[in-house]
Image: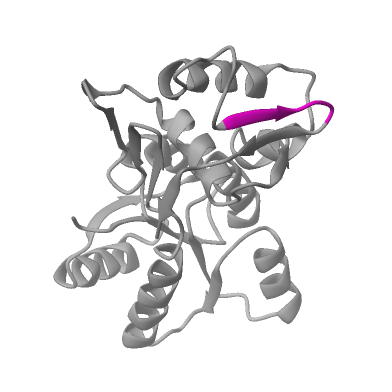
Amino acid sequence: MKSRILIVEDDAALSGILRDNFMAEGYDVQCVVNGDIAVANAREFAPDLILLDVGLPGSNGFDLCSVLRGRRRTPIVMLTARSDKRDKLKGLELGADDYITKPFDLQELLARIHAVLRRACQGVERVALGNVTIDFRRLQAWNGTGAIDFSHREFELLRYLAERPNKVVGRVELLHEIWGYLETPLTRSVDNAIVRLRRKIEPDPQHPRFIHTVHGDGYCLTPGKATS
């Protein structure tokens, strides 16, 4: 299965060069020119990595990094003409996985993208919860009788918990990391999503075996088996 790269770059010539070289390396590639389109494409295309230019028209890459990092835990490599150390630190603090300044060597860029993707693949790819198996790489879930329909957010929520087995994950953390809220709203989105997940994976949703509520704190996943 090809890794998917979303290029967010308003320079059409550079974007075309990057697209052609990434496709030659075996990647599936989409290119967009501004932040609004990038957010929509990140949702639909579900990239494995986002190459993000800082100097975009409208919303700059720093603002966009925060939004994209909150919506999905997708690796982000920032590409910019700014070489100031403060800009680099700002990008990394916002969640970027790497930061590359222009002009750059194409082979170095490819090598660093390979490295970021390799690190990203070291997370949990599949988890078994009783007779339910969830494959996060292929975004598929099934039990002994057939496929289970999960929304994309349900996959992301369950993967986030699976990467922290037997640990309490707070509601606020989940709202920031999975729902993408910058502030903390008064909402039961997390609790409602957990209820839906339990209906799909628990033998008895009223007495959960895998997703446990820690009152006042959040939720804890006790998986049967997880593999990376």
Residue at (57%, 40%) from the top-left corner? Answer: 222
Residue 98 falls in image quadrant? bottom right
Q: Quadrant of the N terminus?
A: bottom left
Q: How many marks?
A: 0
Residue 16: x and y, percent? 25, 63
Queried whether the magenta region covers residue 48, the answer comes back as no
Relative to 52, does residue 38 appear above or below in the rendering?
above
Residue 170 falls in image quadrant? top right
Q: Is residue 184 left or right of residue 42?
A: right
Residue ranking furthest to the top: 206
Q: Is residue 160 left or right of residue 23?
A: right
Colouring convention used in this rendered image of the protein = one colour
Residue 70: x and y, percent? 60, 43
Relative to 3, does residue 201 appear above or below in the rendering?
above
Residue at (55%, 39%) from the top-left corner? Answer: 71
Q: Main secondary structure of the magenta part?
A: strand
Which stretch is magenta?
A: 211-216
Residue in front for this viewpoint, 148 or 88: 148
Relative to 216, does residue 21 appear above or below in the rendering?
below
Residue in front for this viewpoint, 225 or 19: 225
Residue 150: x and y, percent? 37, 25
